[in-house]
Amino acid sequence: MSGNIFIISAPSGSGKSTLTNELRRVVPDLEFSISYTTRPPRGSEQSGREYFFVSREEFERMMQEDEFLEWAEVFGNYYGTAKRFLREATARGHDLLLDIDVQGAATVKRKAPDAISIFVLPPSREELERRLRRRAEADDNLQRQMLGDNARLFNTEAIIQRRLRTASREIENFCEYDYILVNDRLEESIDILTSIVESERVKRSSRAPTTKDLHILAVADRALRPHMLPQVEAVLATFDLSRFPSIRE
């Protein structure tokens, strides 16, 4: 059955973009909603590829005309998902993948309770910081290549610390998601994410499951939030969140 909405959220630096890009490559009939934003492009980003980059005035016009399925303001910039992507995917009989933050995910779940939500966690705070530093270094190098040695670089340390603080707050929302994926080993994570999408298609199909379907269902089942609590607890401990009250709910 088509017409499923898949939500994927993660702290910045968790590897979500790599996972979603690979998911879109290997899973057919899965459309991706490119978000609109008022923030300026970074590095080699292009409008219509990573985001649709629009002015604040244009974004607010779209808000007033109720063109967004969800929107939020983050660090002074707007981000939003246009309703047209859902209409277009449904018309083609395809599923829709939304790469959105926890605020947007909560809004979509209120409007579409059957949406399937997936939260990607880094294996630890230390690993998240390493990934953020590698990405910041790559961004700085790209800026230098494009603009020369006199390029005005970002305040890397301030950005990293801000993202780590934001990650701590976002991670506390894991209990609102259907599936949890700890992105430690990339190939394994891609397999689990693919299995989640395919298993939900099997569940919502009227046909009898095949042997392959049963394997997919078993892989996805292990990623359901109740089954992931021991791994989640270990990750939260590295963020000093091991006593988070909802961990065993």
Image (tube, rainbow, N blue to C red):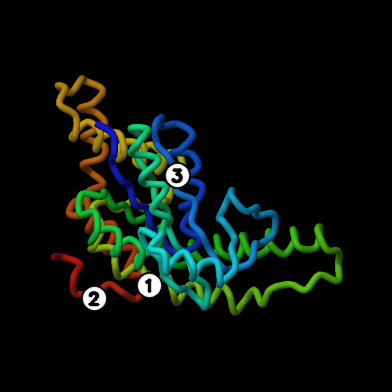
Q: Mark 3 highlights which residue? A: 32
- Distance from disc 2 to disc 1, alpha carbons, whole Å, reads 10 Å
Residue at left 32%, top 60%?
105
Eye-nearest disc, 3 or 2? 3
In the picture, residue 120 is in which quadrant?
A: bottom left
SS at badge 2: loop
- Residue at image coords 23%, 63%: 175
Query: Element type at marker 3?
Result: strand
Picture quadrant of residue 27: top left
Identify which amino acid the numbered label 3 is placed on: Phe
Which of the numbered marks, if any, corresponds to residue 104? none
Would you call the spot at circle 1 few (<14 residues within 10 Å), some (14-19), or many (20 or more)? Answer: some
Indicate the position of residue 61 as horizontal and vertical percent values.
Answer: 49, 68
Q: Which residue is mark 1?
A: 239
Q: Which residue is under mark 2?
A: 243
User: Residue 135 placed where, x, y %?
Assistant: 61, 60
